[in-house]
Amino acid sequence: MPQPVKHSADVMLDAVRTLVLSGGPAAASARAVCLATGASSGSVYHRFPRRDDLVAAAWLRAQDRFLRVYLAALAPADAQAGVRAAVAVLTWCRSQPEDAALLLRHALRDLLRGDTSPELARQAQTHHRALGDALTAVAHATGHRLADVVLAVVDLPYAVARRAMRDNGTPGEDDIEAVRRAVALLLPGPPDSAPSQTVRPRD
């Protein structure tokens, strides 16, 4: 009967995330992970041969968790996709604050000192391509410029999430509603999708 894994990869990556958030990228060394988890150095290096693999794997794990929610919100690429996706950024940050903080505070390139393993490099490229394809699909389907879609569903909600997490810990309902209204203005739907307005006769 196989023995249970005492120190799983997720436990190690949780430790990396905590170390980066509390002490910056330099704090996330293999030795620090060993001390935080009780894992042997051999166990850490067996899973993550390089220090950059360790921090890249933690960051990409957080991004993968985010993209599952975000890409689902962008599909189908209809008139409401932008609003759904922008709101999803804030609701995900509220439900997963530690992963969100890792992604919002640090770009992957800022965590690395050199190259990662080919497998992790491919994973980063896959994430980048999937995000680009989804945003492009929304732009094509709605007739908006790609730059406007990126502004509405990436730049705007990310900025709000960063400010909310810095000031209040997590985004609140007011943040979500503000983003919802802003994206609806930035990416208006076709005229026939707008709510009807009653025109009152003049006195």
Image (tube, helix red, strand yellow):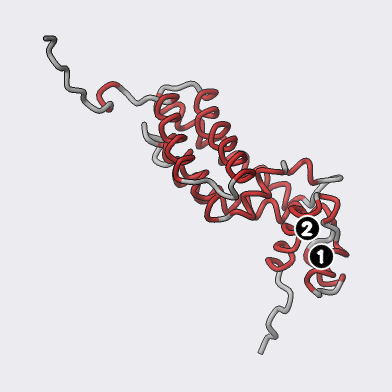
109 sits left or right of 66 in the view: right
The image shows residue 74 at horizontal and vertical percentages of 45, 40
In which quadrant of the rendered view does residue 191 lie? Answer: top left
Q: Outermost residue toward the bottom?
A: 1
SS at badge 2? helix
Query: Can you say whether 45 is above or below 152 in the image?
Result: below
Tag nearer the camera, 1 or 2 = 2
In which quadrant of the rendered view does residue 159 lie? Answer: top right
The image shows residue 61 at horizontal and vertical percentages of 65, 55
Label 1 with label 2: CB-CB less than 8 Å:
yes
Query: What's the residue at 49%, 46% (across, down)?
Result: 172
Residue type highlighted by circle 1: Val
The image shows residue 174 at horizontal and vertical percentages of 45, 41
Query: Toward the viewer: 163 or 190?
Result: 163
SS at badge 1? helix
User: For the C terminus, which image quadrant?
Assistant: top left
Mark linked to residue 33: 1
Q: Outermost residue toward the front?
A: 203
Crowdedness near tag 2: few (<14), some (14–19) or many (≥20) residues, C-alpha within 10 Å: many
Query: Toward the viewer: 167 or 140?
Result: 167
Residue type highlighted by circle 2: Leu
Query: Can you say whether 180 is above or below 118 in the image?
Result: above
User: For the N terminus, which image quadrant?
Assistant: bottom right
Q: Which one is earlier in the sequence, the residue at label 1 or at label 2? A: 2
Q: CA distance from mark 1 to mark 2?
A: 8 Å
18 sits left or right of 86 in the view: right
Residue that carries the numbered disc 2 in the rendered image: 19
The image shows residue 149 at horizontal and vertical percentages of 50, 28
Query: What's the residue at 85%, 74% (across, down)?
Result: 40
